[in-house]
Amino acid sequence: MKLNKRARLSVLALAVLVGLMLLSGCGSSAPTSSDQSSTSAGSTSAGSATSGSVTSGSSTSSGASTNSQGETLYTPSYKLNGNEIAVIKTSKGTIKAKFFEKDAPIASANFIELSLKGFYDGIKFHRFVAGFVIQGGDPNTKSASSKDVAAADAGGTGQFGTGGPGYAIKDEYANNPNKHVDGSLAMARTGAPDSGGSQFYFALAPLANLDGQYTVFGQETSGLDVIHKLRAGDTIESVTIENATK
């Protein structure tokens, strides 16, 4: 009996040891992605404008802040002067927009910085929802034809709307007094916070249901008629910034 008892204890101890070894090796890290999905700002049923979101507050071992999806939260280095005007030349005409630099400095500086690099040149608008938004900023549309981008939007394939600059920026809507009105310029993001990057949209009407959920960082000052003519597949020929800091 004593021998059998010792044998049982040995087997139990061995089982506990094996179990501990298995537990120590079973953790898995979540995959990360630099892609920014389109604003579901285009979800007509819900009327939301998403493009991929992430919660902030975490940081990597190197000290860089990241969102909940593990994307680096980028702070633009461009120094705002308060006089910048975006000149967006499209295949349907030219739009000018002012920035709400005091209320949304990160989104404003990020858009200006990308524009100065030529990031938006050649990108197609990939999403149109009548009476709601016209959305662009996905670099994946550069190599696609206007016809293919329009067809993807019409078919709801989700082929476009996931591209971004390789980082995310923090949301700036919590204390932002600017509302979605006709011609408002705002950041697209996914359903999570702090997931915007390069994708933006123009509101095609007052959109109170999006207020306080998406960062409005600018407003059209001329070319509202052009905004209303835009459709998926139309091209951003160039974006220049008047009065940009040298």
Image (cartoon, rainbow, N blue to C red):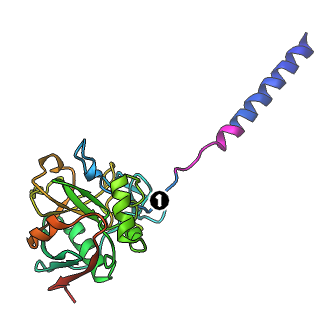
According to the picture, the residue beneath numbered tag 1 turns out to be: 33
Q: Viewer-proximal residue, 209 or 34?
A: 209
Residue 196 in view, yes or no: yes
Residue 155: where, in percent of width, then height?
37, 53
Q: Viewer-proximal residue, 235 or 182?
A: 235
Residue 76: where, in percent of width, then height?
29, 73
Residue 52 in view, yes or no: no
Category of crowding for the residue at label 1, using alpha-carbon neighbours closer than 10 angstroms: few (below 14), some (14–19), many (at least 20): few
Callout count? 1
- Residue 103: image quadrant is bottom left
Residue 115: where, in percent of width, then height?
27, 79
Residue at the (77%, 28%) spot, across then down: 15
Magenta region: 21-30
- Residue 116: image quadrant is bottom left
Residue at the extreme top: 1
Residue at the (21%, 50%) spot, across then down: 213
Residue type, mark 1 in image: Ser
On the rendered image, what quadrant is the C terminus found in?
bottom left
Q: Main secondary structure of the magenta part?
A: loop
